[in-house]
Image (cartoon, grey):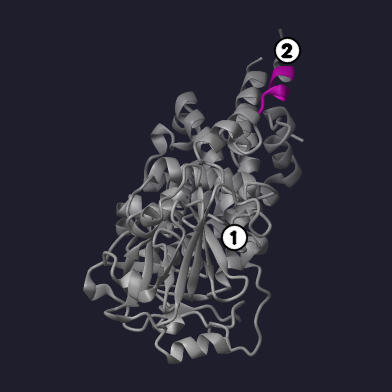
Amino acid sequence: MPTLSPVREKTAARHAVIVRVTHWLTVVAFVALVVTGLCIVISHPRFYWGETGNVNMKPAFTLPIPASRGSVPTAYKFEMPDENGWSRYLHFEAAWLLVLTAIVYGAWGLVSGHFRRNIYPARGERSWGAIWARMNKYLRREAPGKEEEKSYNVLQRVAYLAVIFVLFPAIILTGLAMSPSFVGAFPVIALVAGGKQTARTLHFFLTWALVIFLVVHVVMIAISGFWRRMRAMTIGGGSAAEEDR
Amino acid sequence: MSLITRRRLITTGLATAAGVSGLGVAAKLSRKYGLVPPDCKGVYGAGETLTYAAQRLLIGNAMAREFPRSMISEKPFANPIAPPKEAFKQMQARGFVDWKLTVDGMVEHPMTLSLADLKTLPVHSQITEVSCEEGWSYIAEWIGTPLSGVLNAAGLKPGANYIVYSSIEPDSWDSLDISEAMHPQTLLAMGMNDGDLPVGFGGPLRMRVPRQLGYKNVKFINHITATDSMKHFGKGLGSVNPEYGYAWFAGI
């Protein structure tokens, strides 16, 4: 059946439907969380380590921006627009979207073997050597090999592992560590985070880690063929036949 | 086939996620068990309802964290307050001897209490953290009498679902559901760090709700009302805060 093979290849989607849907729900939630998070942060652009922190205490560091509240002393003579109200409502609503999406994706990823097959580095690649080798390939700007058409390379896998299993769980937990009633019921979360203000500071750094991932991710997509990758992550596709444009 | 099944799976998941406030049956059940906040409508209603319901189901009556005396903040920060009115200043000059707290609404015995009356009630002190929605916080010792004691003395009528409390300042009021109002750490605070509660921190009488954010801790309390529904208070959102985007339930 020589004619069947190319047809099959054309319709074989690179990403499962559930990956595509949860990917874009995460994008929506993440963008909302970053924008509203920044709106919230400017109401008190000072950061502290430990349990407590306020304008009568020495901050660990201060963002060089005006605050949106007059009670925060800054080096600037004007206040930013105060958008804390709707930002807080939307921040927590988007957090729910993120968490519920994560539950669906996480459960499916475990049950379907997606994490084991596509995210956890392949057997021969669980070494610094393999990571270094792939990094060198990027640096030499070599085109990806055939084996990467249907699967992620080791660097991608390590990055996705970090985002899915470290950064997102950590940013959710540090968020919860700031909730007065949640830490009441589960004080261990505040202890692990190192106190409420430490949790807030870590929450801020984790945001930047995720934003840096996002920037690198989008740049890599752009380099490797933006529209083809977008098609693969939306309506599907991205087979070997198409990649040989 | 498998694609359709997956899609359906996702749709079902999302409907459940977004739907607590939207789906008829779920809404009815949630209302029955007190899982729907007064600000459950609008664009952000789904998120608010999920937060409130999840908190009430997961956390129940858990206690807010209490801290050792050594962790009390040396210099607590008080949000700036509007300059007090003349009437307030006169009461302050007299040491607040004529400060009155009115308790009415759905109670068997409406009453008016002076600070001296409140001080005859059991004293409770707690070293808890005040967390502002802006992000800052401090720890202080709060001394007062549990709100539950006053409500028990007044005798809540069956069907009372919310306790509304308001300040002598105009447009400064809020409300708690019964479980938060009866929580052992919810305090009518009259003292702070071994002294009288300073005016800057809400003295002579402040509602202290350690399981929720700072803005629920209304200053200068002089009126408490028990009610079955928040419909007829302000815009019916449970407090004045949701009108500006601040959630009624501030336990987050």
Position of residue B184 measured from the top left corner of the image (x, y, whole percent): 32, 56
Q: Chain of mark 2?
A: A
Position of residue B103 measured from the top left corner of the image (x, y, whole percent): 47, 62
Q: Is residue A14 magenta?
A: yes
Residue density around tag 1, few if under 14, some if 14–19, many if 20 or more, within 10 Å: many
Amino acid at the residue labelled 1: Ser
Q: Chain of mark 1?
A: B
Position of residue B183 measured from the top left corner of the image (x, y, whole percent): 36, 53
Quick check: can you spot residue B66?
yes
Residues behind callouts 2 and 1 on a single chain = no
Residue located beneath label 1 in the image: B239
Decide which of A209, B9 is in the foreground and name it.
B9
Q: CA distance from mark 2 to mark 1?
A: 66 Å
Q: Give, as a single range, the part of the protein colored magenta.
A: A7-15
Q: Which mark is residue A168?
A: none
Above or below, B125 relative to A185: below
Residue located beneath label 2 in the image: A4
Decide which of B55, B14 is in the foreground and name it.
B55
Q: Is residue A222 magenta?
A: no
Q: In the image, B96: left or right of B68? A: right
Decide which of A65, B69 is in the foreground and name it.
B69
Decide which of A72, B91 is in the foreground and name it.
B91
Above or below, B112 relative to B110: below
Position of residue A42 measured from the top left corner of the image (x, y, whole percent): 58, 73
In the picture, residue B187 is in which quadrant? Answer: bottom left
Quick check: can you spot residue B143?
no
Q: Residue at x 56, y 66 (%)?
A: B173
Amino acid at the residue labelled 2: Leu
Quarter of the C terminus of chain A within the rendering? top right
Q: Mark 1 falls on what kind of element?
A: loop
